[in-house]
Each structure stands twice: as structure tokens, then as C-alpha cells.
Amino acid sequence: MKICTPYLVMRNRRIARYRAASKLRKQGKRRGPQISGYVRPGDEIIAPVIINLARPQGVQLVKFLRAVAKTVLVLKTQTRLNFRDTESLHVAGAILLFAELDRIIKLSDLQKPITIIEPRQRRPREVLKQIEIFQLTGDKSDVVPEREDVVFWKTTKGSTQTGDVLGSILECVAERANRDNIKQIELSGIWRGVSEAVANTVDHAYDKPRSDGFAGLEDTKWWMFTQIRNHSFTAAVCDLGCGYRATVNLTIPEVFRAKWAQILTGKNQDVVAVQTAMEYGRSGTHETHRGKGSRDALSVLKKHGTGTLHVLSNTGWVKYEYANGIEVRTESDGIGIDIRGTIIWWTLPLKEE
Amino acid sequence: MITVNIAKDFTRYPSGRLKKNGATSGEGFRELFLEPALSKGEKVLVEFDGTIGYGSSFLDEAFGGLVRKLRIPQSELNENLLLKSSDPSIEEEVRQYIEDAYKSLK
């Protein structure tokens, strides 16, 4: 009988891994971590194949980000994020990735807490470069973003409501969108939604610490992301604060209490909080003239006529859809995991129907 | 009469409510341009064109805040505060914030 040396054990494992991978390939399935599996903290963490917050990829992305946070902030160990198998990045996932990595790096005492292992495919590599992930982590990438659907992704961040940086980026992206498309972007409408979302974030998002105890960074309170892709303009604002539920509960308790009936029927509490804020406003000051910001988010769609607004807050999301200036559909659901933050995200089509 | 063009004299990117949260806020604009003139009974013409747009926080704090802070009689404010915009909805909205602020004082 053949003696089972350590070399043979390793060899057999390698062959088994190869066979399992080729079997998956033949079935047309992707490699990468299990969709809802545990993501182990460690010196190398495998990133999801699809960076998105839709179910079920959202669960996987959030578990990945939690593993990164645990490794760097709790275990105080440097880690490499392996994006080798990552194939695509979507708006909500990309902005949450950008914001969380920025937060983790800023809170860490380590010299270089995170190193990025680049994706194999060129497109996600270009996207990571374009949204400045490599800049965040201090890594270098030789790839030069040149794809039409990548070069108009822009990210920015800030801690105040001062509009100069925010406004000039929006102007730049909108100018490009208006040059290439028949349907024009009404910048004043977008400005109302985006600037009020940022103002809301600065005013209320960090009133309370979020569920993991994080109470905000000194120099960054919001992250913004704009994109032109497939004849659509996208703008997203993200914060890593306590979410709508905490602030709405503080501000409009009567209305919120009345909504408990809905909650008891099984509706996601964060969804109820977002819908309440959209309906009645959101303000932490109890002053009657405050709290118009949430509703301004919808005015972007009214002004543009057609488009969608997604509001993701902690464990729930609400989607508002407009056509010809009127609301045609509202959808809502749970994300399946707490994203520990809020993302407000508009998509405006630039093609005439 | 003093003429204030928000885009030229203050910022092209007005946003937010309070000064502590940003330099382009409604409170900042109010304290810099509206309060000094209106508290002395001077006329002020505010021109809204040329900016990227306006958020409701900025407009409410700048104009509604004026009423809440200075408590100028409504007739005097209507006479002394003149608004000019190519978008009539802006003027309408500002007037509404002023109206709401007077209601909240009662």
C-alpha cells in the first residue's frame, strides 16, 4: 500500500479542487464563496463575484465587509482582499464597498491595513480604479480606465453640506450626459435631491450610533457616486449612520407608532421607517419647518418625469418608480441583512421613450 | 435698494440649512445679505438665476428663517423683499416658506 505522505495529501487535495472547479465550470456555475455562507476573517478574504446589494448577493457583500472590518479593526491584522473572481460591480454595492473600506482604513491603526488583489477581468479592474478603491488602500494598478461605461463613474465624499465639490462633479457628469443623449438632465432637480440627501445625512444620520457602535467619522460623513451607463444617469448618496428607523422614531413618534400595526403584520421595520419619512418628512429637531429633505428625493423623479429612486436603509429597501411625472409603482422588501447605513439612489433614463 | 445675486455674490451651489454644517448654507446667506439690510428697513432684491439649483433646506432657512429670527411685520417684509427668478416655482416656494414661518409664529 502506498504510504500517505504529506506531499500526497496535498496533491490529492489539489486534484480534488481542480476537479470540483472544472465540474462547476462545465455546469456554467461561478467559482467564489457561497452566496450566504460565512465569510471568514483572515489575511486573505475572497470578495464576492458580484458586488451588489440585491438579494442574495447583498448578504454576501455585507458578510464580506464585516469580515474585513473584523480582521482589521478587531483582530488588528492586515488583510488582502481577493477580487480575482469579481466580475461586476453595481451601484449600491459599489458605493457601500467604497464607503465601508474608507471607514475601516480611517479607523485602523495599522500601517497598510488593506491590500487589493485585482480582478482577473478588465472591466471590474477598471471600475475599481475609476472609483478610487486603489487610492483608498494605497495600492497601484496599471490599468487605465477607457471603457465608455466605466469612465463616467465618479466618486466623492465629504463631511459638510458645502455644495462646491458636490456641485462641480454633478455639473461635469450632467454636461457629459446631456451632450450624448437626447433627453436632457435637469440639473436643478437633481441638485435638490442630492443636496438635500447630503444635508439630511449631515444633520441626522449620526444622531445615534449604529448597531455595531460606530458613531461616524470626523472628516467623512457621506459618500457620493455618479454614473452614466446604458443611456441612464445614476447618482447615489451613502452614509454609514443609524438609518431611517432610528431618526424617524425620534422625530415623528405618533405616526411611527401608528405604523406599528403594519410592522406586526410582518412588514420590514426599516421599510416602514423609509415610507414614513417619505410621506411625513424626517427631522431630528421636532420643528415644523424641518424635515422636507426626504420628500425632495422624490422631486428629482417628478422633475425628470421618468426614473427610479431606491432608498436602502439598514435591513430594508423601497423603490419608487415614476413615468410621465407620476408615480406608477412602489416596491419594497428586506435586504436579508443589516447593511448598517443608508443609500439613496436615483436612476434617470436619458433616452426618449 | 440692494440687489443680491445668489450665484454671483454668494455661491453657485447653495445647499443645506445651518452654517455649522457648510459654508453654502441658507443661514449663512441670510446672515450675510438679508438680515443686515432688512433689519434696517432697506429694500432687497434677490436674484435666483445662475445657480445649479436650490434645496428646500436652503430656501426655508434663508427666507423662513428670516421671519423666525427677525420677526419683521409681514407687510413690511412683502414690501422690502423682492424676488426675481426665471423659474416662477422658486419664487412661489420662497413665498410659501415665508407664509409658513408667519403661521408658525402665531
Image: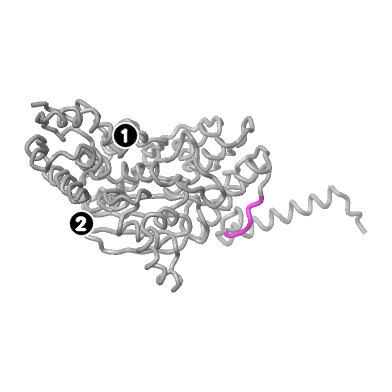
Which x, y percent locates residue A46? Answer: 61, 47
Quadrant in the picture for the C terminus of chain A: bottom left
In the rendered image, which residue does mark 1 sit on? Answer: A163
Report the side of B73 relative to A188 (left or right): left
The region drawn magenta spans A36-40
Task: Pick whichever, A285 or A128, lies toward us.
Answer: A285
Amino acid, disc 1: Gly
Type of secondary structure dominating the magenta stretch:
loop
Dot 2: few (<14), some (14–19), or many (≥20) neighbours within 10 Å?
some
Element type at mark 1: loop
Ranked by sequence position, the earlier of labels 1 and 2 is: 1
- Residue that label 2 marks: A325
Within 10 Å of disc 1 (Cα), the crowding (few <14, some 14-19, many 20+) is: many
Q: Are the residues flagged by discs 1 and 2 from a single subunit?
A: yes
SS at mark 2 in the image: loop
Do callouts 1 and 2 mark residues in contact (Cβ within 8 Å)?
no
Number of marks present in the image shown: 2
Quadrant that contains the N terminus of chain A: bottom right
In the foreground, A287 or A32: A287
At a point 8% along the width and 26% down the height, the residue shown is: B1
Spot occupied by residue A284 in the image (x, y as percentages of width and height): 38, 49
| Mark 2: amino acid | Gly
> Along the line of sight, which residue is nearer the eye, A152 or B29?
B29
